[in-house]
Image (cartoon, rainbow, N blue to C red):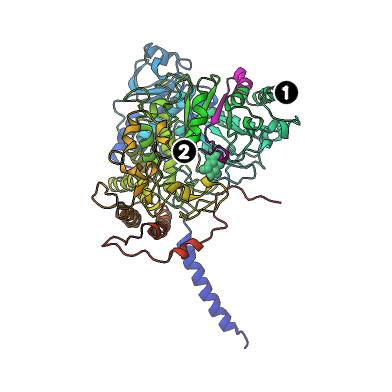
Amino acid sequence: MMFTSYMRTAVAIVLLALVANNTIAQFHFNDEDGYRLWLKYDALSDTPIANTYAKKITTVNVTMPSATGTVIQQELRYALGAMLPGTLHFRDSINDNQLLIGTPASSSAIKKSLSKKDLKHVGDEGFIIRSQTVAGKNVTLIAANSDIGALYGTFHFLRLLQTHQSIARLDISESPKVDVRMLNHWDNLSRYAERGYAGQSIWNWHKLPDYLDQRYYDYARANASIGLNGVSLNNVNATPEILTPQYLEKVAALADLFRPYGIKVYLSINFSSPHIIGGLDNSDPANPKVGQWWKNKANEIYQRIPNFGGFLVKANSEGEPGPGDYGRSHDMGANMLADALAPHGGIVMWRAFVYAHESGEERSKQAYSEFKPLDGKFRDNVLIQVKNGPIDFQPREPFSPLFGATPKTPMMMEFQVTQEYLGFSTHLVYLGTLYEEVLKTDTWAKGQGSTVGRVVDGSLFNNSISGMAGVSNIGADRNWTGHIMLQSNWYVFGRMAWDHELTAQAVAEEWARMTLSNDWEVVNTVTQIMMNSREIAVNYMTPLGLAHMMGTGHHYGPAPWVSELGRPEWNPVYYHRADKNGIGVNRTPTGESAIEQYHEPVRKLYSSTETIPEEFLLWFHHVPWDHTMRSGRPLWDELVHHYYQGAEDAAKMKTTWDGLEGKIDPYQFKQVQMALGIQAKEADWWRNACVLYFQTFSDMPIPEGLKAPKGTLEDYKAMRFPFAPGNTEPRRH
Ligand code: GCW
């Protein structure tokens, strides 16, 4: 049949209508796409608070002539210009109602107005913000010992405005509790981000060093705004090429760009570099040529990057090379690198995430067994970087017993910000509560009050250096983290690295105000969602102390049944040990004995099923299915209830969020709504798969009042995800 022009027109109209509809649904020219993060600086308009701010800040005076001074000036021009449009004037003389920023070195008036002790306690990076008189004028003063301190003070001040706090009578004094506060990017030079779920790596190595993406500046601003002062650029599964001149030139370009923001660059190194790129016979730390190679390399790096931070090392873990390849110990490897960096002020962060099937020891015990005996053997510029839990980044783990075990060696915290085991970038899981739970836990290493936080900040054992690292969730996605709400995890990591005594609740609220809205209903609802979210995920994934039941390799979704992989500790069955009698790992002295690695009274508390907090029950005990829980239910019923509760709460999160429609930016709203839909579906999937699987052991019915899980266990077992994101990079041949 002929396609008449009439028909053609009709089809065109229908197509156009479809396209138009889609266009309306998809284009958001002015809506918030998440790029601006928490630094949105929305106009305060005619609110009463805006009027008080405008009266208090009629002029701005940044007294430092440095690059950091320029950064401060630019940020204030942008931020105040957006929040209080039309009211902003820059001055270089002091007048009443001025925002005055500087250091004793940059302004003699500031110097004169401060007493000796004012800045004594804030150190190199701290600041004070105070309403006071300087040179006879009433000003709001942001003062610090260094320009970087003043930058942190500036961001703190802006945060007060962004969250609508009074600035009438300020008297704030802040300094970071931890020295090294850094992000670890697990980014390959190919731009593939291991365990990254927000697109490619933000580092465009191909275009560096000459092309400096705007994103690098905004990344630096974001980090500085929360007090982060370090970034390790590349994956801990490191390629030696990063240390070649070609790449060091690119690294130097980033280091130069980050310097005014107070951010030092660090690199993950491959221990075999001397052999692979240096042409040496081996990389044995006992070989003097190897030590010399590292010294030369360090000299070369510092020539290009005078403030280079140091090396991050994953050695003899998951196939990475290390001193163990030559029968040498971790301290020997770490000290060799430390000696190369020490003359330049650099540090080594040596990771304790090591486990080896040859050892035969239960996995949770291995890091402690290897590193505890080495206490006191490391150079002063070595920190041991420890994951928060003894196994990996599970939804919940007890704290690693290495915290509190090594009085002479600083233990640096490694938290995961990316959600390898927590639903990737589609599950809303606010990690502030996880961080707080760990940091506030008492190790009892030196009696009561020996919290993990105090081990990490170095105050418990009086360490000379301290650090906290977060494995980044940042990628090239327009909204940086693949999910707007998960920007809060980058944010809370930085805030808690600065001050581990902050509460997750306070930080959630502050983030929600800056990112979403200051409307009290939005703030309350969002904060409540965030605060509950981690426990919800624990419930639908790994309740009651279960762990590591994610799909093999990609770690996406449930696969507690996997049992046939080459090494025992690769299999989820190793981590739950379900059988006809019960479920859980007996880590007491009648079993794996891992409990012995903790101090008393933690050991005693965890040793008994009667006293252990139930959230850790199955981590430390193999418990019969009919064991009576504190609720009065048998274990099986309790476990199932947790799974159902998790899935139900995940669905509720979405309904609660739905209620915010119209109260926040429509595009922000929609993006989160779509992700919450996925999360609710996947929570059901987790619940169904796990309950059906464990039922094959318990042989007990689904408790009364709960609907039978949908589908069959075989269906769930048959699911495959060959292209799930974030896994180790596929090899190209
Ligand atoms: O959790 C595991 C991840 C690996 C990661 C490793 C580590 C960088 O599955 O992808 O490798 O931890 O922390 O070294």
Image quarter of the N terminus: bottom right
Q: Is residue 211 left or right of residue 585?
A: right
Q: Residue under label 2, please give it.
A: 364
**In the image, what residue type sits under mark 1?**
Lys
Q: Nearer the viewer, mark 2 or mark 1?
A: 2
Magenta segment range?
338-360
Q: Is residue 713 visible?
A: yes
Q: Residue under label 1, please give it.
A: 289
Q: Residues within 10 Å of mark 1 (few under 14, many from 20)?
A: some
**In the image, what residue type sits under mark 2?**
Ser
Between 433 and 613, the one lying in front of the other is 613
Cβ of mark 2 under 8 Å from ligand 1: the answer is no
Where, by quadrant of the figure, is residue 593 drawn? top left
Residue 263 — which label? Answer: none
Q: Quarter for ligand 1?
A: top right
Between 129 and 638, the one lying in front of the other is 638
Comes first in the chain, label 2 or label 1: 1
Quick one: SS at disc 2?
helix
Q: Is residue 438 left or right of residue 417?
A: left
| Spatial CA span between label 2 and label 1 | 36 Å
